[in-house]
Image (cartoon, rainbow, N blue to C red):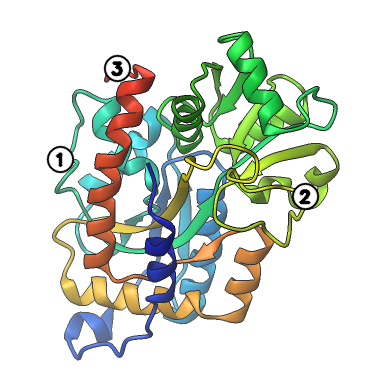
């Protein structure tokens, strides 16, 4: 249902700073601003990471990276826009783990899911945190699971919309715990967290960064994915510690370009992104939002994406999610 821990660590470590190969595209690119399309609403973890990486790439490459949010359609609207763009390196997609879920949500896509994009790299891995309001009666993950078993579809959860990473992360919990919650979709993951803060829904499966900072006093983390607790949220047990060792979902975000983009440009973007991911301010920023840096080369990332698509099939079938 997600990348194995050893795969995450290997990919996070595989971020060499490569020396660009000589070539005209390498030397002349970029000569104008680059659009980086985020297929989700602002303030979510994918948007936050994209903006930080875009800022660093702007500094390194001497041209603005303009973030454009094109939310809707479970990420398909933004993806379709980039898939139609000229493969010249001037329109990129902030691709994320929901891309592997698209075939299970849409019976017909306006682009070839398997061939539309060349993945440049994964920029960040994000654990999944399950959290409730501090006033919630659920003080532990076991409390939540017991209540959900006794009251099917009575406990509400927010997500970034049908097919969003939060939706699938929750569906994976339902499968692993043998429960059924009531889904309340919003326009983005940030809105789903806000819904818990305002007590509109009971629970959210979100980025740990959502509970860092001002929200810490309001959210109560019940569990976090991964093999160890996070220094920023020491009170949050791992899912294994909380009694659900089989839950291992981890989200990721990265950069993709339309298929057909010249390999010299893909390599330049990968090289610059890998360099950005090794800078101290990016490492500090990722730590502040509870992310791990990526940096694996394109071929490795595409292999991991193919594996993850297969893993999500089981979750979709168990959740009864029908393609539209």
For the point 58% across and 72% down, which residue is it? Answer: 282
Q: Dot 3, crowdedness within 10 Å: few (<14), some or many (≥20)?
A: few
Q: Secondary structure at mark 2?
A: loop
Q: CA distance from mark 3 to mark 1?
A: 19 Å
- The answer to whether one can see residue 106 in this image is yes
- Mark before the other along the chain sequence, 2 or 1: 1
Q: Quadrant of the N terminus?
A: top left
Which of the two discs, 2 and 1, sits closer to the camera?
A: 2
Which of the two discs, 3 and 1, sits closer to the camera?
A: 3
- Mark before the other along the chain sequence, 3 or 1: 1
| Residue 322: mark | 3
x, y (%) of residue 249?
46, 44
**Residue with the mark numbered 1:** 112
Q: CA distance from mark 3 to mark 2?
A: 37 Å
Q: Secondary structure at mark 3?
A: loop
- Mark before the other along the chain sequence, 3 or 2: 2
Q: Dot 1, crowdedness within 10 Å: few (<14), some or many (≥20)?
A: few
**Residue with the mark numbered 2:** 235
């Amino acid at each position: 249902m997600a990348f194995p821990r050893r795969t995450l660590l290997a990919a996070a470590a595989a971020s060499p700073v490569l020396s660009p190969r000589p070539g005209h595209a390498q030397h002349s690119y970029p000569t104008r601003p680059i659009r980086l399309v985020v297929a989700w609403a602002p303030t979510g973890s994918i948007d936050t990471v994209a903006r930080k990486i875009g800022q660093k790439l702007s500094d390194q490459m001497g041209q603005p990276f303009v973030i454009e949010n094109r939310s809707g359609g479970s990420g398909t609207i933004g993806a379709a826009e980039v898939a139609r763009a000229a493969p010249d390196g001037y329109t990129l997609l902030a691709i994320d783990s929901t891309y592997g879920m698209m075939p299970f949500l849409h019976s017909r896509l306006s682009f070839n899911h398997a061939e539309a994009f060349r993945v440049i790299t994964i920029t960040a891995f994000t654990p999944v945190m399950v959290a409730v309001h501090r006033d919630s009666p659920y003080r532990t993950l076991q409390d939540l699971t017991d209540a959900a078993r006794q009251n099917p579809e009575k406990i509400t959860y927010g997500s970034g919309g049908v097919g969003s990473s939060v939706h699938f992360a929750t569906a994976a919990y339902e499968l692993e715990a043998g429960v059924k919650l009531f889904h309340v979709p919003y326009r983005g993951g940030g809105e789903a967290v806000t819904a818990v803060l305002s007590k509109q829904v009971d629970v959210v499966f979100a980025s740990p960064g959502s509970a860092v900072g001002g929200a810490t006093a309001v959210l109560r983390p019940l569990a976090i994915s991964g093999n160890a607790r996070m220094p920023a949220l020491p009170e949050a047990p791992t899912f294994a510690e909380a009694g659900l060792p089989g839950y291992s979902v981890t989200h990721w975000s990265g950069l993709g370009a339309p298929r057909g983009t010249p390999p010299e440009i893909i390599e330049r973007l990968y090289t610059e992104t890998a360099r950005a991911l090794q800078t101290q301010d990016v490492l500090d920023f990722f730590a502040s939002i509870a992310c791990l840096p990526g940096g694996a080369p394109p071929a490795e990332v595409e292999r991991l994406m193919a594996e993850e698509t297969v893993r999500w099939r089981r979750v979709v079938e168990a959740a009864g999610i029908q393609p539209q």
